[in-house]
Image: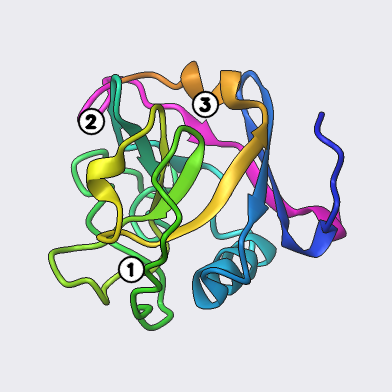
Amino acid sequence: MAEIKDPENTILMELKGGTVTIELLPDVAPKHAERMKELARAGAYDNVAFHRVIEGFMAQTGDVANGNMEKDFNIRMAGTGGSELPDLPAEFSKLPHDRGTLGAARSANPNSANSQFFINFKDNHFLNGQYTVYGRVVSGMEHVDAITRGEPPASPDRMISVKVAADA
């Protein structure tokens, strides 16, 4: 596991294969980093499905309204919701969408990101300047690479638990 330099801005995401350590980037996207910590601390991301996983592109998750596989789960609805918190304004930066970066998922409106996010499987620079980058995987990317593919996957994988390292 990676050395954790800033436990308050580090996310520990438990997947079926093991722990994914994510360094949040509050200096680049403070509102998005804060939202992820708030939802993680509330347990909102626990048991949420990866509802859109495209080979050679990215794995998307984080629909806390419709993605919880332990609570009235319907894969057809997963990906259509967010949290009860207000949408976030875009926090675009010069950081590229490289392999392992977290991007804020949103609708066509750049200021519509809420709880959903994606992890890039490869460098996806065509997304640069269009989606907020607010974190990066620092260890455990092999577990992300193993997530079941599909739009939606026939039997989706889930985030078993998501915690802020300072609380773990």
Which one is nearer the viewer's eye here, 93 or 43?
A: 93
Where residue 108 appears, as percent x and y from the top left, is 13, 65
Q: Of the residues shown, which amino acid type is indicated by label 3?
A: Val
User: Mark 1 Cα within 10 Å, few/some/many (few <14, many 20+)?
Assistant: many
Q: How many marks?
A: 3
Residue 144, disc: 3
Q: Earlier in the sequence, mark 2 or mark 3?
A: 3
Here the colouring is rainbow
Q: Nearer the viewer, mark 1 or mark 2?
A: 1
Q: CA distance from mark 2 to mark 3?
A: 16 Å
Q: Is residue 156 above or below residue 75?
A: above
Where does label 1 land, which residue?
113
Residue at position x 41%, y 60% from top?
A: 94
Residue farthest along the front direction in this orientation: 94
Where does label 2 land, which residue?
152
Where residue 153 appears, as percent x and y from the top left, is 28, 24
Q: Are marks 1 and 2 in contact (CB under 8 Å)?
A: no
Residue at position x 20%, y 30% from top?
A: 151
Q: CA distance from mark 3 to mark 1?
A: 22 Å
